[in-house]
Image: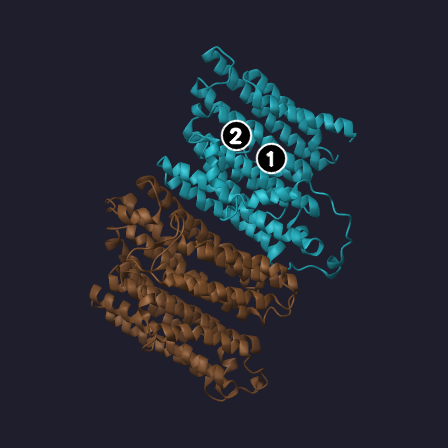
Amino acid sequence: MLKIIIPTIMLMPLTWLSKKNMIWINTTTYSLLISLISLSLLNQPSNNSLNFSLMFFSDPLSAPLLVLTTWLLPLMLMASQHHLSKEPLTRKKLYITMLTMLQTFLIMTFTATELISFYILFEATLVPTLIIITRWGNQTERLNAGLYFLFYTLMGSLPLLVALISIQNLTGSLNFLLIQYWNQALPDSWSNIFLWLACMMAFMVKMPLYGLHLWLPKAHVEAPIAGSMVLAAILLKLGGYGMLRITTMLNPQTSFMAYPFLMLSLWGMIMTSSICLRQTDLKSLIAYSSVSHMALVIVAVLIQTPWSYMGATALMIAHGLTSSMLFCLANSNYERTHSRTMILARGLQTLLPLMAAWWLLASLTNLALPPSINLIGELFVVMSSFSWSNITIILMGANITITALYSLYMLITTQRGKYTHHINSIKPSFTRENALMALHMTPLLLLSLNPKIILGFTY
Amino acid sequence: MNPLIFTTILMTVLLGTMIVMMSSHWLMIWIGFEMNLLAIIPILMKKYNPRTMEASTKYFLTQATASMLLMMAIIINLMHSGQWTITKVFNPTASIIMTSALAMKLGLTPFHFWVPEVTQGISLTSGLILLTWQKLAPMSILYQISPSINLNILLTMAVLSILVGGWGGLNQTQLRKIMAYSSIAHMGWMTAVLVYSPTLTMLNMLIYIMMTLTMFMLFIHSSSTTTLSLSHTWNKTPLTTTLILITLLSMGGLPPLSGFMPKWMIIQELTKNSSIILPTLMAIMALLNLYFYMRLTYSTSLTMFPSTNNMKMKWQFETKRITLLPPLIVMSSLLLPLTPMLSILD
């Protein structure tokens, strides 16, 4: 694993020592090379995990997430070039350093074996993200957004620290490799109910669960593009990944403790999808759609069947790529009109037809069109929740319909119709932007040819 | 002040603390405390104005009361054990009185009221000595009597201190008061784990002193005593803003900085001793502290605080030389990976 971590850390000296006209080229190239190295992890020969050392391992769940993380860094760097072009050199280098630091922590989080190490790195990802949102965001609301983001996550995760330490006290070790073999049922008691709550709330806030999702629209909207991309694509998946890892230790309380959260998620996905229909702010719409998709992942993780785990993993990867692509598209609008209001930049198909093609593809994957991996994820989740309880099909069906409705609403408002008179002098799409969209879309399309690598460890 | 006299007085402060830490006779310990108190009054009053007089008077009164209570506890201990050696306290009453006396010296709730007012009234350097060096002596006595301290009283004082330290600092803009409330909260953390593992108290004290030293050095460097003046550092030395950000986040206890290490170890020790609600509450209340540190970072490093135009063209005076700042910064932010080395402290 050091073959990925050390090059990522070394991206920081690379940034600081590069010449002025080479920083973007150097960092993007080398981070693309690093993502190639991480692709080798997708080859998981044994049924168990690939153990690199006592501290790092990768298994069929964390390998796709790791590849997604390393794939996203060059994309984030490409997306940030425009809005940082006017800043002084030191600030550009600081921004890239923050992104690289975040990347290092994320890689180490996804491959950590020891759960407390996972916790420390999970918390450590908060600091660079906070700095990116608060220092480089564009509106005054970013201060509040940073505070909400930091404090919601910390309030949820401090009980997790206490819970992890008490589990370590009980079992002697928190090394994930050992816990797989130790697994015993938790005895039934009040304190174990609180233990379940303490373990899960951190990830519920991160996902986010419907009642605790207030930080997400703020943070996504106020963050600069790279911040939005990494938040939507990876940081939400940290919550999903953590839940998938920790539910193995929390039986049998999950069978009854999961009900409130299942109810909240099932209702929440409908609510947040419906809110998307009434949004005027483009980034806010994409943010709420993230909440809705993640609610599906929460439902899948809490049901705990093999198919639902497959659906959750596939949906996480698919949503990561789709949501990041949607944010890039929204950012390309924002850079031209400096406004996130949807109706101010409509009829773009006439002006930027290639970008309209990317908008179409992104919207189609967002509404889970076959045969994309979004569909595979959603379908598996719908099927497993139907087998858990027949009535959920009504809610799931309604959600799929409303998702289609708002995706089409977003597409039609921004792309179709007559263009407004004040945007017919916008710059045409840069090659960089088209490359960015292609790099998002190509993994999505290719994965629909062979989805078994993203189906996780229950395949 | 005449440098020779200043040196003598400073040495007396050091000597007083040393006597407290190294004596085994209760009377010598009391003498050490008094020596420390008497010698630090001139240091607190380096600038002679009514505000420092008020601060020094308040400090003197509280610390003298605490010393007298300590003396009473020593005498009761003498009556019940017949000897002056500091081993453990032989009488529960004496133990309670001694704990209260030492809490008064440290600034634990409910004896915390003097800390913000005294810290605010004195200069930054004197505040530094007050909040770091002066905590060493009472903490060393608490360390030595830790087996015989009444757990209920100590834990109540600790939890209340964390609460007061968090809530009290929320409404402050003066940097010295913010550091005072931060000191109250950190003292709460330190005393909470005292009965379970005094080693962790010492670890927390060490890291707290490093972080507070760093913060005060950075404040002295930019000669800023209010949030507003701190927000002008981007103009003078932009690098300092980053250092302030890192140190403040470390004080707030955010991983992966070293300020997380004492909190983590304390939570671990408390949880291993089957008290689970207490560390959860303490950890959540530490978030209050984090809130006003974040507010400071917002005005200093993460935004360009609104300022008038002539603020942007300040005279650049000769930079003050800050002792040992780079090692302090490194130690107050990057020590977390060295946590496994804590086994040497046992």
Colour brown, chain: A
- Near mark 1 (Cα within 10 A), the count class, few <14, some 14-19 or many ≥20, is some
Front residue (pair A245, A149): A245
Colour cyan, chain: B
Give the residue drawn at x 51%, y 64%.
Answer: A31
Residue under label 2, please give it: B103
Establish if A392 lies above or below B338: below
Front residue (pair A220, B240): B240
Q: Position of residue A67 (x, y in %)?
A: 42, 64
Mark 2 or mark 1, earlier in chain: 2
Give the residue drawn at x 58%, y 20%.
Answer: B30
Q: Quadrant of the N terminus of chain B?
A: top right
Give the residue drawn at x 62%, y 50%.
Answer: B243
**Helix, strand, or loop for circle 1?**
helix
Disc assigned to residue B2: none
The residue marked by circle 1 belongs to what chain? B
Q: Position of residue A109 (x, y in %)?
A: 43, 54
Establish if B109 lies above or below B101: below
